[in-house]
């Protein structure tokens, strides 16, 4: 028997965040005290109000198949949320509910991108974007940003990246992994470029919308000239601490929503009916339900910025959302301790895991090899200890 996987599978890489989390778990099982700052998961529990909605759905036997794009009542709730919170006009028929925002984005990419077409990915980008493009047979065109610009796209760079093969732009705000948040004026400047290129569609990944320290969230789908080319992605995992419920959704032009529903119908069909009901309760709730968690993350962010900024060789900016820091550690490349050499971010991340017992993720997986990603979705005490360990590990490098 020949053990041969498909060429499609061979185009895909393992998620770097999941891989690092697995290695950290293996060390923990062997008795090592690992502080894991690798996975993007809130360390809070789902609010009682939302758990109660899921329990009620079970008690009322909402446990059967639902329409592929989701329960109509839930899509109506999402439609109202889009209008209330974002100023976006998506009717229920323009909304598709999926098994997490990851599936939502994959549905869109598979619906829009043909082999040979290009997708612009501003780096740093979420690890799975590039593999989603590869899955569709498209080509990722990585658009570099810099820590000096808080890892945000500059309009002139976007203009230069667009070619006659460009089909799609995918970006997130607040951003995973950088924590960057685009202001309305920055969105407007990018929109002026995109208006000149009507062949380019835009996926706006807004899954971290509620973890935003600026007090205001800007959605590019509100710009009238782009409305028919924007797919807005959101979900309940991050802002409502509902990662395990696996529920994401899109608002899109009708023809794209129908295309995504067709893809989803052949892959998974509708998501869990119970999770849908709980998500409907989440998006119907006052967004202030996330304020306590957001305040905790803001305090932790400041602890991490202060601690990491004091470590030689680590350049840190001030992200305005999500729960990540993305420091530039390239000054440490070329250093070593004993037989261990730090040549890149992956070397440094592995050094921190094996020697400092702090799990992070190398920036190469996000398209930015100068950096590492640290999640501060941990207790303040654990973060302080992580800073101490990282500082000691860096001090040992020569």
Image (cartoon, helix red, strand yellow):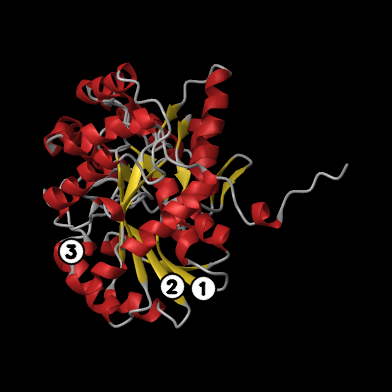
**Residue 222 badge:** 3
Q: Position of residue 218 (x, y in %)?
A: 18, 58
Between 199 and 366, the one lying in front of the other is: 199
Q: Which quarter shows the N terminus? A: top right
Residue 173, quarter of picture: bottom left
Residue 391, quarter of picture: top left
What's the residue at 38%, 62% (across, down)? 256
Q: Which type of secondary structure does the marked residue at label 2 adopt? A: strand
Q: Is residue 340 left or right of residue 179?
A: right
Q: Which is nearer the N-term, disc 2 or disc 1?
A: 1
Classify mark 2: residues with Cα within 10 Å, few (<14), some (14-19) or many (20+).
many
Q: Which type of secondary structure does the marked residue at label 1 adopt? A: loop
Does 321 sit above or below residue 231?
A: above
Q: Which residue in the protein does label 1 denote?
A: 117
Residue 397 can be seen, yes or no: no
Q: CA distance from mark 2 to mark 1?
A: 6 Å
Asked if labels 1 and 2 touch by Cβ distance under 8 angstroms, the answer is yes
Q: Is residue 323 left or right of residue 11?
A: left
Q: Which residue in the protein does label 2 denote?
A: 167
What's the residue at 51%, 38% (across, down)? 18
Between 234 and 273, the one lying in front of the other is: 273
Q: Which is nearer the N-term, disc 2 or disc 3?
A: 2
């Amino acid at each position: 028997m020949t053990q041969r996987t498909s060429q499609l599978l061979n185009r895909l890489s393992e998620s770097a965040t999941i891989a690092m989390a697995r290695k950290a778990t293996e060390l923990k099982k062997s008795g090592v005290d690992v502080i894991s700052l690798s996975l993007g998961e809130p360390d809070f529990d789902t609010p009682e109000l939302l758990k109660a909605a899921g329990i009620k759905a079970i008690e009322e036997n909402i446990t059967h198949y639902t329409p592929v794009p989701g329960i109509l009542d839930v899509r109506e709730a999402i439609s109202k949320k889009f209008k209330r919170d974002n100023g976006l006009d998506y009717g229920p028929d323009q909304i598709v509910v999926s098994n997490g925002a990851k599936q939502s984005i994959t549905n869109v990419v598979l619906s829009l991108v043909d082999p040979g077409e290009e997708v612009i990915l501003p780096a740093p980008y979420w690890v799975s974007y590039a593999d989603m493009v590869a899955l569709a047979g498209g080509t990722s065109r990585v658009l570099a940003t810099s820590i000096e610009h808080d890892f945000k796209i500059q309009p002139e760079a976007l203009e230069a990246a667009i070619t006659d093969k460009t089909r799609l732009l995918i970006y997130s705000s607040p951003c995973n992994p950088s924590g960057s948040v685009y202001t309305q004026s920055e969105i407007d400047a990018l929109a002026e470029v995109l208006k000149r290129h009507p062949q380019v569609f835009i996926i706006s990944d807004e899954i971290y919308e509620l973890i935003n320290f600026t007090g205001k969230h800007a959605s590019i789908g509100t710009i009238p000239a782009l409305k028919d080319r924007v797919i807005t992605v959101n979900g309940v995992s991050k802002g409502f601490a509902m990662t395990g419920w696996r529920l994401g959704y899109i608002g899109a032009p009708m023809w794209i929503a129908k295309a995504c529903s067709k893809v989803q119908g052949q892959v998974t069909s509708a998501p869990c009916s119970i999770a849908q009901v709980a998500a409907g309760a989440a998006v119907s709730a006052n967004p202030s339900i996330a304020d306590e968690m957001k305040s905790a993350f803001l305090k932790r962010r400041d602890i991490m910025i202060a601690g990491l900024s004091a470590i030689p060789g680590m350049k840190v900016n001030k992200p305005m959302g999500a729960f990540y820091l993305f420091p530039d550690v390239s000054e440490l490349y070329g250093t070593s301790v004993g037989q261990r050499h730090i040549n890149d971010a992956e070397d440094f991340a592995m050094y921190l895991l094996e020697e400092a017992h702090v799990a992070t993720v190398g920036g190469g997986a996000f398209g930015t090899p100068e950096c590492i990603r640290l999640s501060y979705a941990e207790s303040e005490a654990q973060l302080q200890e992580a800073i101490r360990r990282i500082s000691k590990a860096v001090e040992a490098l020569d």
